[in-house]
Image (cartoon, rainbow, N blue to C red):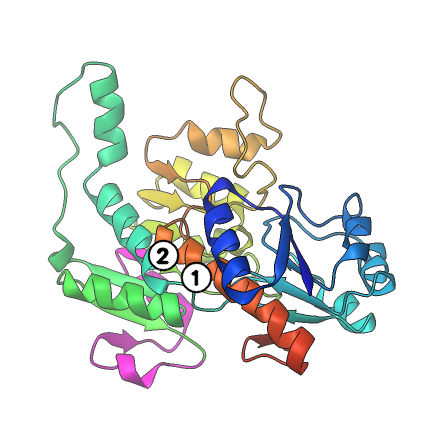
Amino acid sequence: MKILFFSVTEDEKEPVAHWSAEHHIDVDTTRDPLSLATVDRVKRYDGICIQQPVSVGAPEVYRKLKAGGIRQISTRSAGYDAIDLEEAGKNGIVVTNVPAYSPYSVAELAVTQALQLERHIPQFSRRIHHQDFRWDGLISREMRSLTVGIIGTGHIGATAARLFHGLGARVIAFDKYPNEQLRTVVAYQPSFQDVLRGADIVSLHTPLLDTTRHMINKETLALMKPGSFLINIARGGLINTADLIDALEHHQIAGAALDTFEDETMINQDLSGQPLRDPLLGRLIAMDQVILTPHIGFFTTTSVKNMVEGGLNGVVDILTTGTSANLVHI
Protein backbone atom coordinates (compact mmCIF):
# COMPACT_ATOMS: atom_id res chain seq x y z
CA MET A 1 0.00 0.00 0.00
CA LYS A 2 1.21 3.49 -0.88
CA ILE A 3 -0.34 6.74 0.30
CA LEU A 4 0.16 10.29 -1.01
CA PHE A 5 -0.02 12.88 1.77
CA PHE A 6 -0.92 16.31 0.37
CA SER A 7 -0.19 19.74 1.92
CA VAL A 8 2.37 18.44 4.40
CA THR A 9 3.82 20.94 6.86
CA GLU A 10 7.18 20.73 8.62
CA ASP A 11 5.42 19.89 11.88
CA GLU A 12 3.66 16.92 10.28
CA LYS A 13 6.73 15.25 8.82
CA GLU A 14 7.88 13.55 12.01
CA PRO A 15 4.48 12.04 12.94
CA VAL A 16 4.03 10.94 9.30
CA ALA A 17 7.39 9.16 9.37
CA HIS A 18 6.57 7.56 12.73
CA TRP A 19 3.17 6.31 11.52
CA SER A 20 4.70 4.98 8.29
CA ALA A 21 7.36 3.00 10.15
CA GLU A 22 4.90 1.70 12.74
CA HIS A 23 2.40 0.49 10.12
CA HIS A 24 4.94 -0.59 7.47
CA ILE A 25 3.12 1.48 4.86
CA ASP A 26 4.86 3.81 2.41
CA VAL A 27 3.74 7.43 2.70
CA ASP A 28 5.05 10.05 0.29
CA THR A 29 4.47 13.70 1.10
CA THR A 30 4.08 16.88 -0.92
CA ARG A 31 3.64 20.48 0.18
CA ASP A 32 1.16 21.02 -2.63
CA PRO A 33 -2.60 20.76 -2.06
CA LEU A 34 -4.84 18.48 -4.10
CA SER A 35 -5.99 20.37 -7.17
CA LEU A 36 -6.36 20.04 -10.92
CA ALA A 37 -2.65 20.87 -11.20
CA THR A 38 -1.58 18.04 -8.87
CA VAL A 39 -4.24 15.35 -9.22
CA ASP A 40 -2.33 13.35 -11.84
CA ARG A 41 0.29 12.49 -9.19
CA VAL A 42 -2.15 10.07 -7.54
CA LYS A 43 -1.76 7.48 -10.30
CA ARG A 44 1.07 5.72 -8.47
CA TYR A 45 -0.79 5.52 -5.16
CA ASP A 46 -3.53 3.51 -3.50
CA GLY A 47 -4.90 6.27 -1.28
CA ILE A 48 -4.65 9.96 -0.46
CA CYS A 49 -4.77 12.16 2.62
CA ILE A 50 -5.42 15.91 2.44
CA GLN A 51 -5.85 18.98 4.61
CA GLN A 52 -6.56 22.29 2.91
CA PRO A 53 -8.72 25.37 3.43
CA VAL A 54 -9.13 25.90 -0.32
CA SER A 55 -11.43 23.87 -2.53
CA VAL A 56 -10.20 20.63 -4.03
CA GLY A 57 -11.48 22.01 -7.30
CA ALA A 58 -13.72 21.34 -10.25
CA PRO A 59 -15.55 18.09 -11.14
CA GLU A 60 -12.60 17.12 -13.35
CA VAL A 61 -10.47 16.59 -10.23
CA TYR A 62 -12.85 13.88 -9.01
CA ARG A 63 -13.01 12.26 -12.43
CA LYS A 64 -9.23 12.16 -12.55
CA LEU A 65 -9.09 10.65 -9.06
CA LYS A 66 -11.43 7.89 -10.19
CA ALA A 67 -9.42 7.34 -13.37
CA GLY A 68 -6.27 7.11 -11.26
CA GLY A 69 -7.76 4.32 -9.17
CA ILE A 70 -8.44 6.43 -6.09
CA ARG A 71 -11.66 5.52 -4.27
CA GLN A 72 -11.29 7.59 -1.11
CA ILE A 73 -10.30 11.01 0.20
CA SER A 74 -9.21 11.23 3.82
CA THR A 75 -9.15 14.77 5.19
CA ARG A 76 -7.15 15.06 8.40
CA SER A 77 -9.48 17.73 9.77
CA ALA A 78 -12.94 17.91 11.26
CA GLY A 79 -14.22 20.18 8.49
CA TYR A 80 -14.66 18.83 4.99
CA ASP A 81 -16.15 21.79 3.12
CA ALA A 82 -13.13 21.86 0.76
CA ILE A 83 -14.51 18.63 -0.73
CA ASP A 84 -17.47 18.52 -3.11
CA LEU A 85 -19.30 15.56 -1.61
CA GLU A 86 -21.70 15.31 -4.54
CA GLU A 87 -18.88 15.02 -7.08
CA ALA A 88 -17.06 12.56 -4.85
CA GLY A 89 -20.17 10.39 -4.69
CA LYS A 90 -20.69 10.53 -8.45
CA ASN A 91 -17.20 9.12 -8.91
CA GLY A 92 -17.45 6.40 -6.29
CA ILE A 93 -15.13 8.18 -3.87
CA VAL A 94 -15.82 7.93 -0.14
CA VAL A 95 -14.71 10.65 2.27
CA THR A 96 -13.44 10.36 5.84
CA ASN A 97 -12.47 13.05 8.33
CA VAL A 98 -10.96 13.35 11.81
CA PRO A 99 -13.82 14.71 13.89
CA ALA A 100 -12.10 14.86 17.29
CA TYR A 101 -8.35 15.31 16.95
CA SER A 102 -8.16 17.42 20.12
CA PRO A 103 -11.14 19.51 21.15
CA TYR A 104 -8.98 21.23 23.77
CA SER A 105 -6.63 22.77 21.21
CA VAL A 106 -9.41 24.74 19.50
CA ALA A 107 -11.47 25.38 22.62
CA GLU A 108 -8.45 26.76 24.49
CA LEU A 109 -7.86 29.25 21.68
CA ALA A 110 -11.47 30.44 21.99
CA VAL A 111 -10.93 31.08 25.70
CA THR A 112 -7.58 32.76 25.00
CA GLN A 113 -9.16 35.08 22.45
CA ALA A 114 -12.09 35.87 24.74
CA LEU A 115 -9.79 36.85 27.58
CA GLN A 116 -7.63 38.99 25.29
CA LEU A 117 -10.66 40.81 23.91
CA GLU A 118 -12.20 41.38 27.31
CA ARG A 119 -8.90 42.63 28.78
CA HIS A 120 -8.33 44.88 25.73
CA ILE A 121 -4.94 43.32 25.04
CA PRO A 122 -4.86 44.35 21.34
CA GLN A 123 -5.53 48.00 22.22
CA PHE A 124 -3.03 48.05 25.08
CA SER A 125 -0.41 46.40 22.87
CA ARG A 126 -0.91 49.00 20.18
CA ARG A 127 -0.71 51.83 22.72
CA ILE A 128 2.51 50.50 24.22
CA HIS A 129 3.99 50.13 20.74
CA HIS A 130 3.57 53.91 20.51
CA GLN A 131 4.90 54.40 24.08
CA ASP A 132 1.42 55.27 25.33
CA PHE A 133 1.04 53.65 28.75
CA ARG A 134 -2.35 55.08 29.74
CA TRP A 135 -5.29 53.03 30.98
CA ASP A 136 -7.94 55.49 29.80
CA GLY A 137 -11.14 53.97 28.43
CA LEU A 138 -10.01 50.35 28.57
CA ILE A 139 -11.37 49.04 31.85
CA SER A 140 -12.33 45.35 31.73
CA ARG A 141 -14.97 43.05 33.13
CA GLU A 142 -14.24 39.78 34.93
CA MET A 143 -15.19 36.55 33.18
CA ARG A 144 -17.31 35.46 36.16
CA SER A 145 -19.57 38.47 35.58
CA LEU A 146 -20.22 37.61 31.93
CA THR A 147 -22.52 35.39 29.90
CA VAL A 148 -20.80 33.37 27.19
CA GLY A 149 -22.85 32.05 24.29
CA ILE A 150 -21.77 28.87 22.51
CA ILE A 151 -23.21 28.17 19.05
CA GLY A 152 -22.75 24.45 18.45
CA THR A 153 -22.00 22.04 21.30
CA GLY A 154 -20.19 19.23 19.53
CA HIS A 155 -16.77 18.05 20.75
CA ILE A 156 -15.14 21.49 20.53
CA GLY A 157 -18.12 23.59 21.59
CA ALA A 158 -18.75 21.36 24.59
CA THR A 159 -15.12 21.63 25.66
CA ALA A 160 -15.20 25.41 25.28
CA ALA A 161 -18.41 25.55 27.35
CA ARG A 162 -16.78 23.62 30.16
CA LEU A 163 -13.67 25.83 30.10
CA PHE A 164 -15.71 29.04 30.21
CA HIS A 165 -17.87 27.57 32.98
CA GLY A 166 -14.69 26.73 34.88
CA LEU A 167 -13.73 30.41 34.76
CA GLY A 168 -17.02 31.28 36.42
CA ALA A 169 -18.96 32.54 33.40
CA ARG A 170 -22.63 31.82 32.88
CA VAL A 171 -22.80 29.75 29.71
CA ILE A 172 -25.76 29.64 27.34
CA ALA A 173 -25.85 27.65 24.12
CA PHE A 174 -27.75 26.62 21.04
CA ASP A 175 -27.47 23.36 19.18
CA LYS A 176 -30.05 21.66 17.01
CA TYR A 177 -29.21 18.48 18.93
CA PRO A 178 -28.49 19.48 22.56
CA ASN A 179 -25.83 17.55 24.47
CA GLU A 180 -27.64 16.18 27.52
CA GLN A 181 -24.33 15.75 29.37
CA LEU A 182 -23.87 19.54 29.27
CA ARG A 183 -27.10 20.39 31.05
CA THR A 184 -25.24 21.06 34.32
CA VAL A 185 -22.85 23.43 32.52
CA VAL A 186 -24.96 25.31 29.96
CA ALA A 187 -28.46 26.68 29.65
CA TYR A 188 -29.70 25.77 26.18
CA GLN A 189 -31.69 28.46 24.37
CA PRO A 190 -34.56 28.01 21.88
CA SER A 191 -32.56 29.51 18.98
CA PHE A 192 -29.12 30.83 18.15
CA GLN A 193 -30.68 34.29 17.90
CA ASP A 194 -31.57 34.01 21.59
CA VAL A 195 -27.92 33.26 22.33
CA LEU A 196 -26.85 36.35 20.39
CA ARG A 197 -29.26 38.52 22.38
CA GLY A 198 -28.20 37.20 25.76
CA ALA A 199 -24.42 36.77 25.50
CA ASP A 200 -21.57 39.13 26.26
CA ILE A 201 -19.23 36.84 24.31
CA VAL A 202 -20.42 34.68 21.40
CA SER A 203 -18.20 31.78 20.27
CA LEU A 204 -18.99 29.90 17.06
CA HIS A 205 -18.43 26.13 16.95
CA THR A 206 -20.64 24.96 14.10
CA PRO A 207 -19.72 23.39 10.74
CA LEU A 208 -20.10 25.32 7.49
CA LEU A 209 -23.24 24.08 5.75
CA ASP A 210 -25.70 25.66 3.36
CA THR A 211 -27.88 26.37 6.40
CA THR A 212 -25.08 28.00 8.43
CA ARG A 213 -23.29 30.03 5.73
CA HIS A 214 -23.41 33.72 6.70
CA MET A 215 -25.46 32.92 9.79
CA ILE A 216 -23.70 35.96 11.26
CA ASN A 217 -24.87 38.84 9.09
CA LYS A 218 -26.33 42.33 9.29
CA GLU A 219 -29.59 41.13 10.80
CA THR A 220 -28.11 38.76 13.38
CA LEU A 221 -25.29 41.12 14.37
CA ALA A 222 -27.96 43.70 15.19
CA LEU A 223 -29.25 41.32 17.88
CA MET A 224 -25.97 41.37 19.80
CA LYS A 225 -25.23 43.64 22.76
CA PRO A 226 -23.24 46.81 21.97
CA GLY A 227 -20.46 45.75 24.35
CA SER A 228 -20.28 42.13 23.18
CA PHE A 229 -17.53 40.22 21.42
CA LEU A 230 -17.70 37.66 18.59
CA ILE A 231 -15.26 34.75 18.27
CA ASN A 232 -14.98 32.50 15.22
CA ILE A 233 -12.60 29.58 15.31
CA ALA A 234 -14.86 27.32 13.23
CA ARG A 235 -15.26 28.30 9.57
CA GLY A 236 -14.86 31.69 7.91
CA GLY A 237 -18.00 31.33 5.83
CA LEU A 238 -20.18 31.43 8.95
CA ILE A 239 -19.72 35.22 8.94
CA ASN A 240 -20.55 37.78 6.30
CA THR A 241 -17.29 39.69 6.61
CA ALA A 242 -18.56 42.95 5.12
CA ASP A 243 -21.45 42.98 7.59
CA LEU A 244 -19.10 42.28 10.49
CA ILE A 245 -16.82 45.16 9.50
CA ASP A 246 -19.83 47.47 9.30
CA ALA A 247 -20.96 46.37 12.78
CA LEU A 248 -17.48 46.98 14.20
CA GLU A 249 -17.11 50.37 12.55
CA HIS A 250 -20.50 51.49 13.87
CA HIS A 251 -19.80 50.05 17.35
CA GLN A 252 -22.72 47.64 17.19
CA ILE A 253 -20.37 45.16 18.87
CA ALA A 254 -17.16 45.84 20.79
CA GLY A 255 -14.76 43.54 18.97
CA ALA A 256 -14.08 40.22 17.29
CA ALA A 257 -11.49 37.45 17.20
CA LEU A 258 -11.23 35.48 13.97
CA ASP A 259 -9.09 32.40 13.42
CA THR A 260 -10.83 31.65 10.13
CA PHE A 261 -11.66 33.83 7.12
CA GLU A 262 -13.98 33.60 4.16
CA ASP A 263 -10.96 33.63 1.84
CA GLU A 264 -8.16 31.44 3.22
CA THR A 265 -5.94 31.24 0.16
CA MET A 266 -3.22 33.07 2.09
CA ILE A 267 -3.11 30.71 5.07
CA ASN A 268 0.37 29.52 6.10
CA GLN A 269 2.07 31.77 3.54
CA ASP A 270 4.50 34.67 4.04
CA LEU A 271 3.04 37.58 2.09
CA SER A 272 5.22 40.26 3.70
CA GLY A 273 5.41 43.36 1.53
CA GLN A 274 2.79 42.10 -0.91
CA PRO A 275 -0.64 43.64 -1.46
CA LEU A 276 -3.52 41.69 0.04
CA ARG A 277 -5.95 40.21 -2.47
CA ASP A 278 -8.77 40.57 0.03
CA PRO A 279 -9.49 44.25 0.86
CA LEU A 280 -11.88 43.23 3.64
CA LEU A 281 -9.07 41.41 5.42
CA GLY A 282 -6.95 44.55 5.19
CA ARG A 283 -9.70 46.54 6.90
CA LEU A 284 -9.89 43.98 9.71
CA ILE A 285 -6.11 44.08 10.20
CA ALA A 286 -6.30 47.85 10.67
CA MET A 287 -8.79 47.55 13.55
CA ASP A 288 -7.34 47.46 17.06
CA GLN A 289 -10.47 45.82 18.49
CA VAL A 290 -9.98 42.77 16.25
CA ILE A 291 -7.71 39.77 16.84
CA LEU A 292 -6.71 37.78 13.74
CA THR A 293 -4.86 34.46 13.74
CA PRO A 294 -4.13 32.33 10.63
CA HIS A 295 -6.29 29.25 11.30
CA ILE A 296 -4.14 27.98 14.18
CA GLY A 297 -6.88 26.57 16.41
CA PHE A 298 -5.71 23.04 15.67
CA PHE A 299 -2.00 23.88 15.82
CA THR A 300 -0.72 22.07 18.91
CA THR A 301 1.60 19.09 19.10
CA THR A 302 -1.21 16.86 20.32
CA SER A 303 -3.62 17.91 17.58
CA VAL A 304 -1.12 17.63 14.74
CA LYS A 305 -0.14 14.12 15.83
CA ASN A 306 -3.77 13.05 16.16
CA MET A 307 -4.73 14.59 12.82
CA VAL A 308 -1.89 12.86 10.98
CA GLU A 309 -2.66 9.51 12.56
CA GLY A 310 -6.41 9.90 12.16
CA GLY A 311 -6.09 10.94 8.54
CA LEU A 312 -3.80 8.07 7.61
CA ASN A 313 -5.88 5.58 9.58
CA GLY A 314 -8.89 6.74 7.58
CA VAL A 315 -7.11 5.83 4.34
CA VAL A 316 -6.27 2.35 5.63
CA ASP A 317 -9.79 1.80 6.97
CA ILE A 318 -11.36 2.42 3.57
CA LEU A 319 -8.77 0.51 1.55
CA THR A 320 -8.88 -2.55 3.81
CA THR A 321 -12.48 -2.71 5.02
CA GLY A 322 -14.41 -0.38 2.74
CA THR A 323 -15.77 1.65 5.65
CA SER A 324 -14.68 3.76 8.60
CA ALA A 325 -16.05 5.03 11.90
CA ASN A 326 -15.24 8.50 10.54
CA LEU A 327 -17.06 8.15 7.26
CA VAL A 328 -18.58 11.39 5.98
CA HIS A 329 -22.01 10.51 4.63
CA ILE A 330 -22.57 11.83 1.13
Rendering coords of residue 83 (x, y %):
68, 60
Mark 2 lies on residue:
302
Residue at 78% x, 49% y is 41
Q: Is residue 164 above or below residue 11?
A: below
Magenta part of the protein: which range? 177-202
**Residue 52 image position (x, y, % from top left):** 60, 50
CA gap between label 1 and label 2 equals 6 Å
Give the quadrant of the C terminus.
bottom right
Question: Please, what secondary structure does the residue beneath circle 2 have?
Answer: helix
Do the CB atoms of the residues marked 1 and 2 lie less than 8 Å apart? yes
Residue 211 place in picture, x, y as percent: 58, 68
Q: Is residue 215 visible?
A: no
Amino acid type indicated by mark 1:
Asn
Q: Is residue 59 visible?
A: yes
Quarter of the image for residue 191 reads: bottom left
Across and down, in percent, residue 155 comes to 38, 70
Answer left or right for 262 relative to 129: right
Measuring 31% from the left and 61% from the top, which residue is drawn there? Answer: 104
Q: Quadrant of residue 72?
A: bottom right
| Magenta stretch encompasses residue 97 | no
Q: Quadrant of the N terminus?
A: bottom right
At label 2, the amino acid type is: Thr
Query: How many numbered marks have been drawn onto this rendered protein structure?
Result: 2
Is residue 190 located in the magenta-colored stretch of the structure?
yes
Judged left or right of residue 204, residue 169 is left
Q: Which mark is residue 122?
A: none
